[in-house]
Amino acid sequence: MEVFPLSPEFECDDPFETTVGPVDIEASDDECLTLADRKVKEITAAERQTFAQLMDEFAKGFDPDSLTREIMATLPLLGDDLFPGSFAHLLILLLQTDGKIETVQVNLVRWLRARYPIMFCEPTETQLVDETFFMSEIEMLRRLLSTLRGDDDKAIYWISCRPFEIGKSCNSLEASIRVIRAFERDMKSAIEEVDEERHFYIDLPVGTERTQLTSMRAQRCDSSQATIGWNNYLESEIELTKFHQYFKHHAMEHDHDKARGFGWLPPEHIKVPRSSAIDVDLVDVSDWSLNDHQKKVMSLLFKVAQWLGLARGHAPLHLFCDVARNFTIHKPSKKPRISYILFMQKLSEIRLCPSSIKSQVPTPFPYDDKIYADRNPNFFVDLFRSSKNLVLCQIEMTSFLKKKTDKKKPGDSNHGTSGRQSSPGMKIRMVTQFPEIHGSLAGAWEGSHMQNMAKKTAPLAIPSASLPAEETTLDHPASPEEERMVYRFAGYARSI
């Protein structure tokens, strides 16, 4: 196939004239159809029925209005008994306002300093990639959930109204159900067994396997971003031709009905999926061995996952479940692994900026840019095919995370560095002495800190790679802005 031809290879009098489409075929009598067309019609009808059944199963208990009310009622409770890396912490990062997240993060830094030494790490280049990838995935999820926070008033294009080919829609919806059921099983196991083996880093050397996993994660983020706007996934290689780009642009500008028929514009009326049995949740946590507060957190976690699957699609749901698997409901032990302390530190220092993620994925090239389209057509074809293969891998796998086999009891490592605690090559320093804090920064934090660090504690400023920093005493009560600046600098110092 010739890529980027100016016109199609077949003869066409006027590509912008209305032609006979699927609607005309459905309106005609079955007797006028060929045997092949009748078979296609029967298969399509059966697949639509299957899709409706799958939607009814996946949307069980779903009510967007009650979900909004539940979020508003649960958010103020998430701060109770909060610690870094908890499921409540994840929900705060995704659903809370920017200002309240800042307050929570500062308090979590205080919580950590009152209990554990500060970790200074020097990650390798591959570890930096893993860490950055994980943070960007959380940022992507916050962008995907902007509608639930009220930060985005754009329309939600539910999966029931996206014009995928019906067979692919069924496969994607089946995959979403498998993902959330696997997530449910993993959460049950995580509640029953305490696991403090947590970090951002992939236990794979630089090579083909790591590259494949990184590519799948990148494609998952790209697919998730595309669900924010109207569906514009590439369905065939004809979308890489100039003719298709010209025709698509013309239809979207001048013939909206035809553009909607091809799926290039959203429908005028979008139906919100609702469950026929709203009293039964998709995942029922009422009989789980949790207290009332934990049940509220877990229930909201599964409902957010369900909302993502219905409002955004399979890729965002897949992303959310994998990110949530890194969090826990169990408080850390008194002597957790070094990697776990570092993990909690990094999560407490997160500052997200999801506004940089655009809602519209650009087309391969501008519809009228002939020079750009002719530069390297093979690149677009190869990228298109590779992306399709990566999406197929995502459909087949319920998670990209490696299953953990050997569970270890909390605190058995005594700050050791064996196993998967810290990836090979990482240099870590611990600081067990803390600076004296004066002014309004002292207060309750100093009291709890002195109780937990009853041993001798000498005044120590934030460590520096050069000359030791001097201790600073404020001659006035610190303002909230000054207090935030202190902890921002502390987070920056740890990353040096």
Image (cartoon, rainbow, N blue to C red):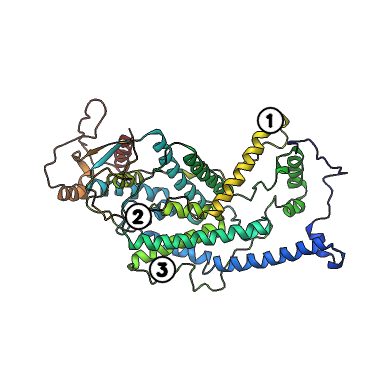
The reply to whether callout 1 and callout 3 are in contact (CB within 8 Å) is no
Residue 297 seen: no
Which residue is nearer to you in this view: 384 or 55?
A: 384
Residue 230 percent coordinates (x, y): 63, 50
Which residue is nearer to you in this view: 87 or 230?
A: 87
Q: Residues within 10 Å of mark 3 (few under 14, many from 20)?
A: some
Of mark 1 and mark 3, the one earlier in the sequence is 3
Which residue is nearer to you in this view: 292 or 440?
A: 292
Q: For numbered disc 2, what is the local secondary structure? A: loop
Q: Amino acid at mark 3?
A: Val
Of mark 2 and mark 1, the one earlier in the sequence is 2
Q: Which mark is residue 86?
A: 2
Q: Amino acid at mark 1?
A: Tyr
Report, in whole angstroms, how far the alpha carbon at label 2 lies from the one at label 1. Answer: 48 Å
The residue that mark 3 highlights is: 285
Of mark 3 and mark 2, the one earlier in the sequence is 2
The residue that mark 1 highlights is: 372
Quarter that holds the N terminus: top right
Q: Is residue 28 above or below residue 413?
A: below
Q: Residues within 10 Å of mark 2 (few under 14, many from 20)?
A: many
Which residue is nearer to you in this view: 207 or 380?
A: 207
